[in-house]
Image (cartoon, rainbow, N blue to C red):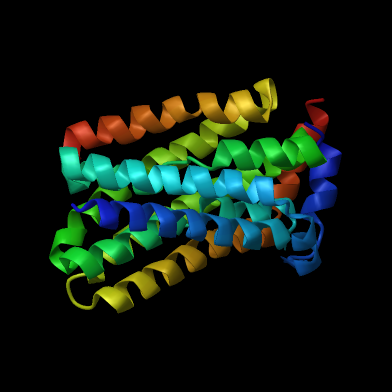
Amino acid sequence: MDGRQLRDDDLEPVGFDWSKLRKASPPELLIRFVFGGGIALVAAISGSVFGPRFGGLFLAFPAVLPATLTLIEKKEGTTKAWADASGGVLGAIGLAAFAFTALQLLRANPVAALALALLAWLLVSGGLYFLSRKTGLFLWQDKLLTKSR
Amino acid sequence: MSTALIGLKALLGGFAVVGFSLIGQAGHPKRFAGLFSAAPSVALASLAMAVIAKGASATLPYAQGMLIGSAGMVAYGLVSLVLINRLHALVGSILAWLAWFAVAGGLYLVVGG
């Protein structure tokens, strides 16, 4: 883990570089498709056998993360993989917001419930990211990691 | 649940994961991109299919289970940060599944079963 590399990355402006998608190789996408489809299959079958509440657990299972993080580590190093995983923690808190919103609104209007649940995920995970960024929490963490080396 | 519905859930889940992972791949910095690693891709596809096939009321227990699972996901994320730092990405991120099973499974047994 390289705190300085992490800090340099954290100082980058937030955005999307769509040209990076040209580097997305079909085998990598296939791996993600298989793991994503696989966990949806596990959720559906276990929901059918053990009840939908049990199956629902797997809708928030990190099935694809090991593949994603390993690919990032291979291409860009462990520090970048760690940074991706650290964003994943904020995304996971957003997942709880997604489930909570869906739970509250599904009965009233299922389509709106899922759309608003997605919005809740975006707002909570994005909000936590920007809050941590603006308050310097990430840079403070990077400094601690640099010192600990 | 019919085989066709299960197959459709798996197919849509796979496409949703690829879609969100492409957004994450384009995103920067890496911590921001990481948000999309924990996007509700499979959940969105599966819940939408469940609503269409069975209606909103029958879908509620799936969302309840997901809420419990997402506590496991947060635990997974925190533990994976420690393990990736010590054991690298593949081993660390797979071993961290134990944290998901402990927290999601434990909570399910206490409140969800």
Q: Position of residue A98 (x, y in %)?
A: 38, 61
Q: Residue at 57%, 50% (x, y): give it.
A: B37
- Residue A80 place in picture, x, y as percent: 75, 42
Residue A29 lies, in percent from the top left, at 63, 51
Quadrant containing the C terminus of chain B is top left
Q: Residue at x 65, y 39 (%)?
A: A69
B12 relative to B54 in the view: left or right: right
| Closer-to-camera residue (B57/A43) | A43
Which of the 4 image quarters holds residue B63?
bottom left
As drawn, A102 above or below B109: below
Residue at point 24%, 70% (across, down): B52
Q: Which of the 4 image quadrants contains residue A149?
A: top right
Q: Nearer the viewer, residue B60 or B48?
A: B48
Could you tell whether B17 is left or right of A130 in the image? left
Residue B89, given in percent of the width and then of the height, sits at: 66, 30
Q: Is residue A138 left or right of residue B47?
A: right
Whether residue A85 is situated above or below residue B10 in the rendered picture: above
Judge by depth and name the residue closer to the eye, B21 or B2. B2
Q: Is residue B88 visible?
A: yes
Q: Answer with left or right where residue A128 lies relative to residue B107.
A: right
Q: Residue at x 61, y 33 (%)?
A: B81
